[in-house]
DNA sequence: GTAACCTAAGAAAGCGTTTCCTTATAAATT
DNA sequence: AATTTATAAGGAAACGCTTTCTTAGGTTAC
């Protein structure tokens, strides 16, 4: 059996409560006693039992992570390791650990969250995505359980601490960049329309298109079910239009890889025939051929701030706030000025 | 304050111990009482407190994950989400959750493991990597704490349940494949030599080279510090040799992206000038241009089996075992038969 | 020299479960 | 009818810690 606070107390010839106070570095204990107790702890190799402490304390020093359904392919996106790295960094600063439940389906994930919350397994929760009408978010609000969201809540955004990019503006800028290169027929390849980020970026794209006096055409808007079969289909359709786009705004670098590969299959190359620009600037964007023009959204910082916001929320009941993580456009080689009409394929 | 077992007991007019037995579905409780208690739980929205349960039970229903230092760039490798997806799937089947500590440095990570173990925060641990002389592994063995390793332990492999590919054979086969295409000067681009997987693959490569009667040359062996600056340097050196390789075996698909991009920079293209083959077959391998020839190591299954092995270990004290997850070579377009000498660059 | 006040540390009551040990009641055995 | 045996459920200790309340002993103050 592991060594407990009582064993330490006995050896140091003090009461268990004293040992507890030494651990908490309570000023009411004399230096001499502290030293004595610490020696005993050292000698016995004492480590506090976290469950007991959590129980007495009502605090677990752990934060729960809620990912999108892992059945989802999105899960393989390097976005997640990176955002977790950010969360982990901040969590570590404050001695928090991370906790993930393991549901696959929608319902299982929800059940996992309920267990985290009601079972007091975590002190707070970070939602790693933001969807339209999310049941989990509603639940957490009802329970008044501390949580933060990465992305923008679809409803009640002002009541929920959330960490987001200005995706509207980012998309607008990215689109403007393509327009500035002379492109007039610009397609938008989005992801799941249930994700708020998709909506924001689509709106930003639309704004840029309209502001530039270009036609906003529904046929130019495509939503890939991530990057395989469905997406290929979509890209094929897009490029069999009578007036196919000459440039694409794509929701995510990983998708871009899929898009580029599909374009290749139909004999179009990037950036010679089609310019492609996307979001996230994952490490790979730099290494792909061509290197991708991408909006760096500071994934690490999203995670870092999300954890920071949550801890404020837990420790000081801080009021809800919105944190906007800056983005910046990284121009590489996947976009080219539009050729004069005759020169295009 | 949350509703406790006592509240339920009071409402159902039974003792707390009875409620506890109903939760555990103990046969000693009559069906009638069970129904009554369940109604009360339902009515009050009761959820057991996990910390209290863990304390009484000495079991947490959580397994700890130990990753390589997140400072490490390896962290951004989609290997991790995928292996975690596998772990998560098995864990979920048995109602376990996942727990990650948040250290950055070597020491912090070690300290995190000690806290997981001594603090009884988890029932067992999965090491997501295997290194030469790993302090954590030694510690877990000393403590006789349940754990499994993904990869092959450097020492005492027969005493430790581990889930591995036959990396030796996989590398051998991959190299043989290149040899079968006529390549005779084949380089090896490895990762961190502290990782056992690197060693195994290097040995498999060497075996294939020697078996084919080719020269095993040290200059052809390069170890990239993952895929950026250092790696570019290395690749440059490799291709300024008097007799540069015509094909490369690369440790990891992500590295391959770096390698291909560096080759491009020095005017070599894949597979026209250089054939490249690697390991892992991450989703992106298929989408890159050219699509990569890669050994699929079944990452998901590695995670799944690792969790399974650990749970056996926890639940039934199963003896140590080695699980070999099959691999298979996926041939795509990154390798070509070697051109006759005169035709090469 | 006694009352008043500090200070350091102990005793004990939780925290919410589980589980061992009892007890009460009903059924079965003699 | 008295005793044993089953059965269903309750009581209370235990899990390892924190924290409130107390106490003991030493200072200071009058």
Image (tube, coloured by chain):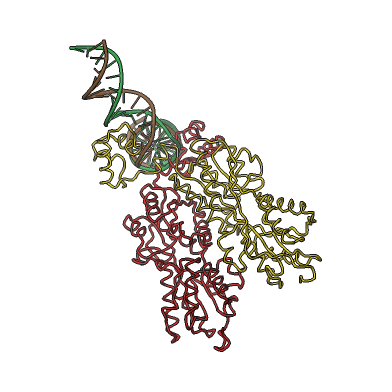
Chain colours: A yellow, B red, C green, D brown
Residue, far right: A242
Q: Is residue B217 above or below residue B33?
A: below
Location of residue B251 in the rendering, given as x and y in whole percent from the top left corner = 48, 71
Q: Is residue A83 above or below residue B284?
A: above
The residue at the point 44 percent across, 82 percent down is B209
Q: Nearer the viewer, residue D9 or A252?
A: A252
Q: Nearer the viewer, residue A258 or B94?
A: A258
| Quadrant position of the C terminus of chain A in the picture | bottom right
Q: Quadrant of residue B333?
A: bottom right
Task: Evaluate whether residue B311 shows in this view.
Answer: no
Q: Nearer the viewer, residue B107 or B81?
A: B107
Location of residue B211 in the rendering, given as x and y in whole percent from the top left corner = 43, 84
A288 sits to left or right of B316: right
Q: Is residue A119 above or below residue A171?
A: above
B89 sits to left or right of A229: left
Q: Nearer the viewer, residue B72 or B326?
A: B72
Location of residue B49 in the rendering, given as x and y in whole percent from the top left corner = 47, 40
The residue at the point 31 percent across, 42 percent down is A4
Q: Quadrant of residue B56?
A: top left
Q: Is residue A179 above or below residue B296?
A: above
Location of residue B172 in the rendering, given as x and y in whole percent from the top left corner = 46, 78
Task: Evaluate whether residue B104 shows in this view.
Answer: yes
């Amino acid at each position: 059996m592991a060594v407990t606070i009582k064993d330490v107390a006995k050896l140091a010839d003090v009461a268990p409560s004293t040992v507890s106070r030494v651990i908490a570095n309570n000023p009411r204990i004399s230096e001499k006693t502290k030293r004595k107790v610490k020696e005993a702890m050292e000698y016995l190799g004492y480590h506090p039992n976290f469950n007991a402490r959590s129980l007495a304390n009502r605090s677990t020093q752990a934060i729960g992570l809620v990912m999108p359904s892992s059945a989802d392919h999105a899960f393989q996106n390097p976005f997640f390791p990176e955002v977790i790295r950010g969360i982990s960094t901040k969590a570590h600063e404050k001695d928090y650990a991370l906790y993930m439940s393991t549901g696959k389906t929608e319902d299982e994930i929800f059940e996992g969250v309920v267990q985290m919350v009601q079972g007091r397994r975590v002190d707070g929760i970070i939602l790693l995505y933001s969807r339209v009408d999310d049941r989990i978010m509603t639940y957490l609000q009802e329970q008044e359980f501390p949580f933060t969201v990465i992305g923008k809540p679809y409803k009640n955004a002002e009541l929920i601490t959330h960490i987001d990019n200005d995706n509207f503006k980012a998309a607008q800028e990215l689109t403007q960049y393509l327009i500035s290169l002379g492109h007039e027929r610009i397609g938008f390849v989005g992801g799941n329309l249930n994700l708020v980020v998709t909506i924001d970026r689509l709106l930003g794209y639309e704004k840029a298109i309209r502001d530039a006096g270009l036609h906003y055409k529904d046929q130019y808007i495509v939503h890939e079910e991530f990057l395989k079969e469905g997406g290929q289909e979509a890209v094929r359709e897009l490029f069999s239009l009578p007036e196919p786009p000459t440039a694409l705004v794509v929701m995510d670098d990983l998708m871009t890889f899929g898009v580029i590969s599909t374009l290749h299959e139909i004999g179009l190359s990037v950036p010679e025939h089609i310019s492609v620009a996307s979001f996230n600037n994952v490490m790979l964007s730099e290494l792909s051929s061509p290197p991708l023009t991408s909006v760096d959204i500071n994934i690490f910082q999203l995670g870092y701030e999300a954890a920071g916001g949550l801890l404020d929320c837990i420790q000081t009941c801080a009021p809800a706030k919105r944190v906007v993580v800056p983005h910046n456009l990284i121009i590489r080689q996947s976009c080219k000025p539009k050729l004069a009409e005759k020169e295009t394929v």
